[in-house]
Image (tube, grey):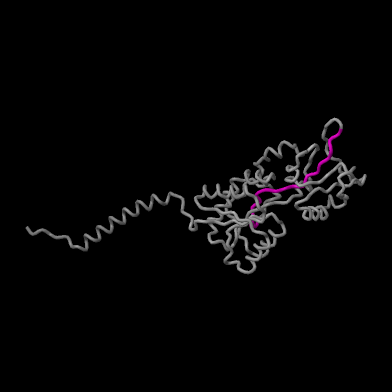
Amino acid sequence: MQKYKIPLSLHVMKGFILLSLVFFIFSGCKLEEAKPLRHKRIVICSDTYCKADSLLAKKIGNEAKVKVELWYMPREEMETWILKNRYNAPFDALIISSEAFRTKLKDSNVLSPITGESTFKDIQRQFYNTHKKWLTLCHDPLIIGNKKDSTEACYAINWNKVKSDSIPLYFKVKKNSSFFLTRLKNSKRFSNYPLTQDPNSSPYFLIQLSELIDQKKKPACYSYVLENKKFLTLSTSISIYKFSRNRDATNQIVALFSKHRYQFAANKNQLSPFKDIKPNWEISRLTIH
């Protein structure tokens, strides 16, 4: 009996099907792994220099398996890039500590919404924004201090008495004095309180939280300056640059900054805007009311 020979074309087709099956099996396994980021480097520019932020960015990069670089860049330089060469700016995300500059960037339509509800989970209402063009990472509120009495006891400040007696408040803010002076001037509650630069003319003083922590001696009672249950504060936020080379990867990095929310605020001796995060030890030991 003559044996039937299988045509060469069928051999080729059989090999192709077998190869395709092997490829499919291995590809199916790969689908369960995290997708690699298209770009090996994410650049974040910050308008405030902080070495601890760079170390945290490196830690986050290791976690995401991508190189994350944090550059310090003055706001003027950022604005020059955005105005003159926005499509080729060297950054993917921005860390901003200026409310005016942050609003200007939003109005210039160069910020992308941050996606992922978990990124904003447990954030206080004061710091939540519906447009999601930035995520507040920490804030540096205004503090009022008054000297302890002879018994070393601390009492709540009687604001009505301070106002009726026209007692001036010693304005001790250094780093962001113009910002807080403007906030106080525009405040319905505090605009009529007189301020002084003379430390000997008032038992009360106003100071920024981070500056208070930097002081060596802190023999006083402290309270947060609140208006309508909101802090008078300067916040620092992170945003995704609209023309980033890889917005998906940058969004992933922003989510990791949210995950490490305690560390970012603690590094700066500031408060976290998230309800579930307690202040660091330097702040907690002051017992601020």
Instruction: Judge whether 25 appears above or below 89 on screen.
Output: above
Q: Is residue 79 visible?
A: yes
148 to the left or right of 94:
right
Residue 115 position in % (x across, y down) = 58, 54
Image point 82% across, 35% down: which residue?
A: 154
| 12 part of magenta stretch | no
Near-viewer residue (157 or 202): 202
Q: Is residue 132 visible?
A: no
Residue 164 position in % (x across, y down) = 92, 45
173 to the left or right of 122:
right
Image point 72% across, 36% down: which residue?
A: 285
Residue 148 position in % (x across, y down) = 84, 35
Main secondary structure of the magenta stretch: strand
| 147 part of magenta stretch | yes
Residue 275 position in % (x across, y down) = 67, 43
Near-viewer residue (234 or 11): 234
Furthest-left residue in view?
1
Furthest-right residue in view?
165
Quarter where residue 99 is shown: bottom right
- Magenta part of the chain: 130-149
Quarter of the image with the C terminus is top right
Quarter of the image with the N terminus is bottom left
Furthest-top residue in view?
151
Instruction: Judge whether 246 appears above or below 189 on screen.
Output: below
Instruction: Judge whether 1 appears above or below 222 on screen.
Output: below
Image point 89% across, 47% down: which residue?
A: 168
